[in-house]
Amino acid sequence: MNAEIIAVGSELLLGQIANTNAQFISEQLALLGVNVYFHTVCGDNEGRLLEAVRHAESRADLLIFTGGLGPTRDDLTKETVAHALNRQLITDQQAMDSILDFFQKTGRVMTENNKKQALVIENSTVLPNRHGMAPGMIAEENGRLYLLMPGVPSEMKPMFLDFARGYLTRRNNEHIQSRVLRFFGIGESMLETKLLDLIDAQSNPTIAPLAKESEVTLRLTAKHPQKEMAIQMLDQAEEKIKIRVGSYLYGYNEESLPEVVFRLLTAKKQTIAFAESLTGGMAADWLTAFPGASAVLKGGIVCYTNEVKAAVLGVPEPILNEEGAVSASCAQQMARLVREKCGTSIGVSFTGVAGPDKSEGKEVGTVFIGISDKQQTKSFRFSFSGTRSKIRIQSAKTGYDLVRRQLSDLPLHVKD
Amino acid sequence: MNAEIIAVGSELLLGQIANTNAQFISEQLALLGVNVYFHTVCGDNEGRLLEAVRHAESRADLLIFTGGLGPTRDDLTKETVAHALNRQLITDQQAMDSILDFFQKTGRVMTENNKKQALVIENSTVLPNRHGMAPGMIAEENGRLYLLMPGVPSEMKPMFLDFARGYLTRRNNEHIQSRVLRFFGIGESMLETKLLDLIDAQSNPTIAPLAKESEVTLRLTAKHPQKEMAIQMLDQAEEKIKIRVGSYLYGYNEESLPEVVFRLLTAKKQTIAFAESLTGGMAADWLTAFPGASAVLKGGIVCYTNEVKAAVLGVPEPILNEEGAVSASCAQQMARLVREKCGTSIGVSFTGVAGPDKSEGKEVGTVFIGISDKQQTKSFRFSFSGTRSKIRIQSAKTGYDLVRRQLSDLPLHVKD
């Protein structure tokens, strides 16, 4: 199956946003064994979109559209595809109900143009939109598939994963099995060096490293006519990798470090609280993202100024005045105090210099992370680099990795 | 002048990277008044690339290529364009010198294939690459321009800004001026309905709505031979829009709501603290992102459980037990208490049901936001919809919008 991805939206041609939808869909199609030969971006213009559809039909048998399904006049993807297929647009009652429901729930007044969102191409399979109003759809004609999805990534991605992917898999018989191993605390080049002979020797499964956002991933991809065999090939490759760098491996596929820590805390019936200076609430926020977070996260204190560190958290003034807020003692006090105040089994603290300027004479990137439980309170010093945002994120992730190591009985601090 | 941007590289079609080059170039071309009607992405395949060139020639008079200028076999952009133009590739001595120089300086051994990078299309203008080895080039044929640049963004961007932009400006006389107006608290369809006559009547400037992440933007775009006149046309259109929906307008272009609130707090010398239940630290985190945040953000309390609401923040037990944590009284207490504890001029609180399950018998999406200053403490009830993540983000943004309205002397709560 050969696919072409057509993104519709003048905002793309004006450079206001990048076409990240095409990246996501391409990545997903690669996993399904579908070839992508072209991406096309075209504006909110019926004539030019129709031209793009005709051209794509000449070279692809799966046409995937993103964008142009909304309520306004410049949204015209389904109108144009319906025209190309010589079909009508009809109202989908389920979509209409969920639009009416949305306006009723939120108490907003529904304007007439919203009804346009419930129109779908006749004889198409409607794909529900759980995160917005405009449904997606798949139409078939002469063995060619036309998949239409919204342009908002937070609506398009779940629609693809929950509905479109299954539809495509059923039409496709090659088994490509992929697994992403996620590492924290080890650099890409170090990981590659430790696994070089494995990476070079393997062609099935392939092993591909990728660094992003202070983490490294390895994507293992195996091909086999039988799914079970492909999975077994991945298991074997993973075992070999684990022997060498297993303690850095925190999770799989789309799992995040906070998700893994959330699961560990839940499984071990532990509770946690954060005292956050430079991370400013980020660490607590990450855990709050999970349903049921209240079973493990009790709360936290954002102590961005020394005033709040002393008055709300109770860090002794001599520590702040003599050793400074960016110090091992302060990090330890913060971790211990937030644990006691919130009544949790674990307390984690973050204090450091996010930049762009030095603070207390300490270099940008100097960060102390404290971790405290009933047995002991420790802190570790780190020197991170990069932008303010990168230093803050790296700090929060490192705090999570310390908790992961603690709960998994791994050594807390590892240097390569 | 109509442009088409053709990105060459199989890594794009595999979804390993997003086509951010097209975004950058489109943004730059918009500033130059060049229309972009299509983006195309095509793999490292000569036949398909040639097809893309031929097709682009049929609809554009400026073809911009990124990628495929490197030393390896799968780099074939200039070979293909030379073929399309029926021209030869010749060695550019300056490029060759800088390649040799690079290897001498770095002490690396030059492999033979690197010489390929010094080949350029005959009779083209060579664009130096100050950040890499492969030069760019511009060829003209039948009034059509072919601009070839490297795919690595850190090489392409300076090449465009330092060399290609000047070349294009000299051939182009129109000025396009764009401005994005950013709104919060009003839906896309409602905004369009209120401005429908303006949107329909205007062709220069054009007014285009776009919804994303619980916000709506309007993009105004004016064309005029003189830049100052284009700006004046935007000013006039903005004034008309402000009369109708001005109180929802919070910022311009890439500004975010937290950024606007950070600026307002700084300008008015106000300080803020957050008491966060369902947002779990997100609101404080957003403000911490800005350098100098400590001048306005003192801290906050993440009170995810009732225990912490009572013990750390001091919300009276009867409120929690009788009215519940998700109540107007609790929101008001939280906002007032966090302001007092952290010693700030403003306190903002968030409490609600993020889902996926009901809580205290209250529906998912029920959120109370409190805001407190020395004069008074208020709270507002909202019914948000969508995923847990969407409800949490919408809550935090709404809290920021309340602060923006308070600091701008606008009515705090508006219903459409």
Image (cartoon, coloured by chain):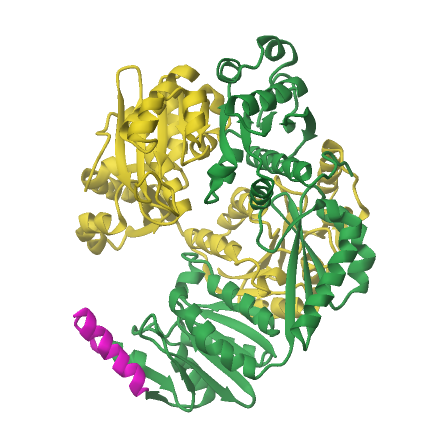
Chain colours: A yellow, B green
Point out residue A414 in the picture as x, y percentages from the top left corner: 21, 36
Rendered residue at 44%/31% (across/down): A305
Residues in magenta? B92-113
Point out residue A293 in the picture as x, y percentages from the top left corner: 47, 25
Point out residue B356 in the picture as x, y percentages from the top left corner: 57, 27
Residue A172 higher or lower than B350, as above or below: below
Rendered residue at 41%/65% (across/down): B153
Queried whether the magenta region covers residue A224, the answer comes back as no
Which residue is more in the foreground, B189 or B252? B252
Query: Is any part of residue A168 visible from this angle?
Result: yes
Residue A218 higher or lower than B5, as above or below: above
Query: Is any part of residue A223 visible from this angle?
Result: no
Rendered residue at 60%/9% (across/down): B321
Queried whether the magenta region covers residue B107, the answer comes back as yes
Quadrant containing the C terminus of chain B is top right
Q: Quadrant of residue A244?
A: top left
Q: Quadrant of residue A127?
A: top right
Quadrant containing the N terminus of chain B is bottom right
Point out residue B195 in the picture as x, y percentages from the top left corner: 79, 54
